[in-house]
Image (spheres, rainbow, N blue to C red):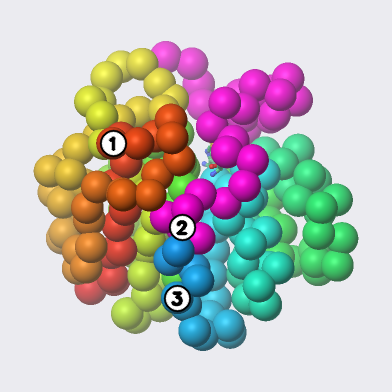
Amino acid sequence: METLDKTYWEERYKSDDVAWDTGSITPPIKQYIDQLTDKNARILVPGAGNGHEFAYLAENGFENATVLDIAETPLKNIAARLPHLTAERLINADFFEHYGTYNLIIEQTFFCALPPALRQNYVTKMHSLLAPGGKLAGLLFDFELTEQGPPFGGSREEYVNLFAPLFKINMLHRAYNSIKRREGKELFFIFEKK
Ligand SMILES: C[S@@+](CC[C@H](N)C(=O)[O-])C[C@H]1O[C@@H](n2cnc3c(N)ncnc32)[C@H](O)[C@@H]1O
């Protein structure tokens, strides 16, 4: 397997090899954000790439939403699209080396991009980044995990086993409003920090 490091991701953006990029916020996450009422919530979108979910938050008055990615190119794209943003809302860092406290973290094709060996680290890191009662919400793929990836798949059962020790599984079901090419292949979830 290739090393999925900063150089790998930077190259993917520089060569415009970004098949995962949906071009706009996906309907399941838009619907979730649309029912949020606390515009002051501290929100993190990690592994955000070109940040369509983050842009939607920023454009809808979530002043404490922050975006993080290991690659610099997509963050520059976001800064160009949203020139009013202050620099501290765009974090160029490795998620596993980032520290902060958030009320909500949004997952959109970040988990599936990581080498599967890092899954347990992802769970504990997410837990440590959330304030008491904080939530991790978004989409996880629902197709077989193989050696090939990214994206790397997974199943509802695997996700319950991974997350349930540290999170309450408030919701984990087949998304009914996926974009066409992901129909039947993703689970919408809300996990709450225990
Ligand atoms: C498959 S892309 C998804 C991007 C975005 N979420 C989307 O849906 O368009 C995975 C993203 O995670 C980023 N990434 C991978 N490993 C990372 C890490 N350790 N820390 C932060 N970002 C990382 C990559 O640079 C890339 O932008």
Question: Where does ligand 1 appear, by image quarter?
Answer: top right
Q: Earlier along the polypeptide chain: callout 1 or callout 2?
A: 2
Percent across and percent down for residue 49 are 62, 43
The residue located at (29%, 71%) in the rendering is: 193
The residue located at (26%, 29%) in the rendering is: 143
| Residue type highlighted by circle 3 | Gln
| Residue type highlighted by circle 2 | Ile
5 inside magenta stretch = yes
**Tags 1 and 2 in contact by the CB under 8 Å rule?**
no
When asked about the image quadrant of residue 44, the answer is bottom right
Q: Secondary structure at mark 1?
A: loop
Q: Secondary structure at mark 2?
A: helix
Q: Is residue 77 above or below residue 144?
A: below
Q: CA distance from mark 1 to mark 3?
A: 24 Å
Task: Give the magenta part as a residue range.
Answer: 1-30
Which residue position holds label 3?
A: 35
How packed mark 2 is, by other alpha carbons closer than 10 Å (few <14, some 14-19, many 20 or more), is many
Give residue 29's mark. Answer: 2
The residue located at (76%, 38%) in the rendering is: 73
